[in-house]
């Protein structure tokens, strides 16, 4: 077990049914999934300091287990280029949701986006998905599944099974996606599913391909309901 | 483990009678008994009916407990409520297996009755098929345990396919039509409600049988994922492909999912992943199930090493169709190299096209050997993995020439040959059937022929990947 159990335990103790973006990524990163460099901050000064240490530009996001749709709530500001902008973004988020944690993270830019995930099928158990992400996700509906756990070769076969697998190769002047890193991430998701029975679903959306390197820019881990809320 | 079911030495039929239904047809229990007799079951048969001393010339017994000898298999064809008691009597008698044809269990919401039936069977160590099943057939052993009207086809056509279906009525109709088309079977099982034995366990058993070369599966849902995967792995190890058609492509339950991934999952996408991961050959059209299965049975030892096809026909038009279908199916049609073209030009009329697809033109019939020499030359190319032959309008005696020569070519070839015969069959009465007789996969459309070749290539790719993983 690579652990991460403490992250889940603490979230459950707080009565949460999902992990926040930051906690989700902390758990993913314990299994070797590449995630954005980021700092969870609780004050304007901390936010600015974090931005300066990460290097501009940065993204600033409200971070709460209770809020899954951050963009709709005005809790995502991208491409902030100086301390002033970061400070004001921090203030705006605190004004919208008092006391909310504020995540300051590196801006990862890439023209290709993927979605990785984990679901539990009633018959086949934990299943890992790989799909084409971005604004056309639903229209393209290009996603493939494998039953977890599985080996690296199977993860590579998943990439080949995508209808738009050409997007992963050298494409329009973009380098080929690092298949090794992507395969490791898919295998890792399967391992998480096998090792943490109390994780019901995972969404890594988007996994941005920056140059050739895939990085999880946002993530959501859905837990089974905490025991207290199941009581009728 | 299911030998007592598939290879019984004795069968008791609980619920056979002389009565007829309101429409004048025999009752289901009687049908099951008649089918058993008419298909010449070689073991002992015991009709069970408290009101009769004799049925169809066989001594009838008032209860299964009164049968003087051991009973391996019992058919239960009594009303659902009476099945639990009948199963308990079978258990007391020491019966080893059963087929419960009766309906009125979980399929109508009566899950509790089904659980009681299961408990009665388990208490006596009885394994059973059903309930709510059309039964099963072991063609090789003349063991027909079925109420399906398809049993009027007598004898069944023997062959290499074991057919497992979760729909009894559709399964029976598919079986009948396939046998009419010359496709033969080793076994047929309608799994019914799968209270005890499920589709995965039938597959697990059938894979071990020598007369089974390939398993055709009509699936509505998987009851036990891990057991299904284990059976699929076993089939791959035994080199007996599973060809599957599955209903239910709609994304049931997706709306309730909390994450994006959950919403995109749906049972069909996950099942597609299972097929690719564990090497099941999935067909999109139920009509392709048996023809694909038969192709695997016949060409299982000549799987194409790659996806590069040679295409030969006497019609330029159909060459174009085939090239398009290959592209859609992800098969390549590489241009022949200069040496091959030069060789083939010696066999064909001067206006023929020798790039690949190779259009030998209708004039080819002026040569006794030009067609065969061309096909052989294409097969010899190291960059060709399989050959698709297209016959358009060919009447006798030309049709017989094709039937004979293609059969000979297919027999000697180390690479797969698949034929699409698109012209009038009524004018090819001798030639076309030769292909079936000589185990040459043949289709009536180009699309089917190309899809069959694609399925072979996909399966071969899966196998080589699986082998590579085993080595590492």
Image: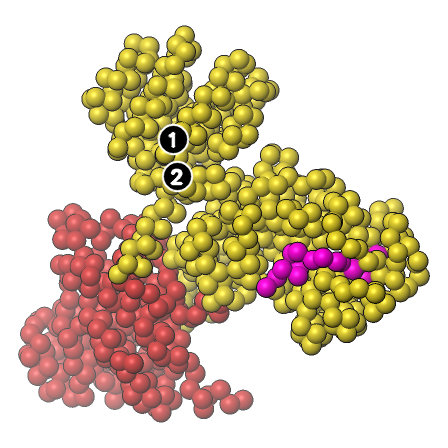
Chain colours: A red, B yellow
Which of the two labelled residues, at mark 1 and mark 2, occupies the earlier sequence position? Answer: 2
- Indicate whether residue B295 is drawn in magenta: no
Viewer can see residue A65: yes
Decide if residue B281 is on the left or right side of residue B137.
Answer: left
Q: Residue at x 33, y 28 (%)?
A: B379
Residue matched to label 1: B413
SS of the residue at dot 1? loop
Decide if residue A32 is on the left or right side of residue B182.
Answer: left
Q: Which mark is residue B302?
A: 2
Determine the residue located farthest toward the front in the rendered image: B69
Q: Quadrant of residue B261?
A: bottom left
Are marks 1 and 2 in one subunit? yes
Determine the residue located farthest toward the top in the rendered image: B366
Q: Quadrant of residue B52?
A: bottom right
- The CA distance from mark 1 to mark 2 is 9 Å
Quadrant (top left/top right/bottom left/bottom right) for the N terminus of chain B: bottom right
User: Please, which chain is the residue tagged with disc 2 on?
Assistant: B
Q: Residue at x 44, y 39 (%)?
A: B299
Q: Nearer the viewer, residue A133 or B144?
A: B144
Q: What residue span does the magenta drawing correspond to? A: B1-16
Spot occupied by residue B305 in the image (x, y as percentages of width and height): 32, 41
């Amino acid at each position: 077990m690579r652990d991460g159990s403490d992250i889940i335990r603490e979230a459950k103790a707080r009565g949460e049914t999902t992990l926040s973006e930051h906690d989700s990524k902390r758990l993913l990163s314990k299994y070797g999934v590449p995630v954005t460099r980021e700092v969870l901050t609780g004050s304007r000064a901390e936010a600015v300091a974090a931005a300066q240490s990460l290097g501009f530009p940065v993204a600033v996001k409200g971070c709460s287990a209770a809020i899954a749709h951050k963009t709709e709530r005005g809790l995502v500001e991208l491409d902030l280029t100086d301390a002033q902008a970061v400070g004001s973004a921090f203030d705006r988020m605190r004004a919208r949701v008092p006391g909310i944690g504020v995540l300051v993270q590196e801006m990862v830019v890439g023209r290709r986006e993927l979605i990785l995930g984990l679901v539990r099928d009633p018959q086949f158990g934990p299943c890992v998905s790989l799909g084409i992400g971005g604004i056309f996700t639903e229209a393209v509906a290009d996603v493939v599944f494998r039953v977890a756990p599985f080996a690296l070769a199977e993860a590579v076969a998943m990439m080949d099974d995508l209808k738009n697998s050409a997007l992963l190769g050298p494409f329009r002047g973009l380098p080929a996606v690092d298949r090794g890193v992507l395969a490791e991430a898919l295998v890792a998701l399967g391992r998480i599913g096998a090792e943490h029975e109390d994780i019901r679903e995972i969404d890594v959306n988007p996994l941005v391909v920056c140059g050739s390197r895939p990085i999880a820019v946002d993530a959501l881990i859905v837990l089974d309901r905490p025991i207290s809320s199941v009581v009728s | 483990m299911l030998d007592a079911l598939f290879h019984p030495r004795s069968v008791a039929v609980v619920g056979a009678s002389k009565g007829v239904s309101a429409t004048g047809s025999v009752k289901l229990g009687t049908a099951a008994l008649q089918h058993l007799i008419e298909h010449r079951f070689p073991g002992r048969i015991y009709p069970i009916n408290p009101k009769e001393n004799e049925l169809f010339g066989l001594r009838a017994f008032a209860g299964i407990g009164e049968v003087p000898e051991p009973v391996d298999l019992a058919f239960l064809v009594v009303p659902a409520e009476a099945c639990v008691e009948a199963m308990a009597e079978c258990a007391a008698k020491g019966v080893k297996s059963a087929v419960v044809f009766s309906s009125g269990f979980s399929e109508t919401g009566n899950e509790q009755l089904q659980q009681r039936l299961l408990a009665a069977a388990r208490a006596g160590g009885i394994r059973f098929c059903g309930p709510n099943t059309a039964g099963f057939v072991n063609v090789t052993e003349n063991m027909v345990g079925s109420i399906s009207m398809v049993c009027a086809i007598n004898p069944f056509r023997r062959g290499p396919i074991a057919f497992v279906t979760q729909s009894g009525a559709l399964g029976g109709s598919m079986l009948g039509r396939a046998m009419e088309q010359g496709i033969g079977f080793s076994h047929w099982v309608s799994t019914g409600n799968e209270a005890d034995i499920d589709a995965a366990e039938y597959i697990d058993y059938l894979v071990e049988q020598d007369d089974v070369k390939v398993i055709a599966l009509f699936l509505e849902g998987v009851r036990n994922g891990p057991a299904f995967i284990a059976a699929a792995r076993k089939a791959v190890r035994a080199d007996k492909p599973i060809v599957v058609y599955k209903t239910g492509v709609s994304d049931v339950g997706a709306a309730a999912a909390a994450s994006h991934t959950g919403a995109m999952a749906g049972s069909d996408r996950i099942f597609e992943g299972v097929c690719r991961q564990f090497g099941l050959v999935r067909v999109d059209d139920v009509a392709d199930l048996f023809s694909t299965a038969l192709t695997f049975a016949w060409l299982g030892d000549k799987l194409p090493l790659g996806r590069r096809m040679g295409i030969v026909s006497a019609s330029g038009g159909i060459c174009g169709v085939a090239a398009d279908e290959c592209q859609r199916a992800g098969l390549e049609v590489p241009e022949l190299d200069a040496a091959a073209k030069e060789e083939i030009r010696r066999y064909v009329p001067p206006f023929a096209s020798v790039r690949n697809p190779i259009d030998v033109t209708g004039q080819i019939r002026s040569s006794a050997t030009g067609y065969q020499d061309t096909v052989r030359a294409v097969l010899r190319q190291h960059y060709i993995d399989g050959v698709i032959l297209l016959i358009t309008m060919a009447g006798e005696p030309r049709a017989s020439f094709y039937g004979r020569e293609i059969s000979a070519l297919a027999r000697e070839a180390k690479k797969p040959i698949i034929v699409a015969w698109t012209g009038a069959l009524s004018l090819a009465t001798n030639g076309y059937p030769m292909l079936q007789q000589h185990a040459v996969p043949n289709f009536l459309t180009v699309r089917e022929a190309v899809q069959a070749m694609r399925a072979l290539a996909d399966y071969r790719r899966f196998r080589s990947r699986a082998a590579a993983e085993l080595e590492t």
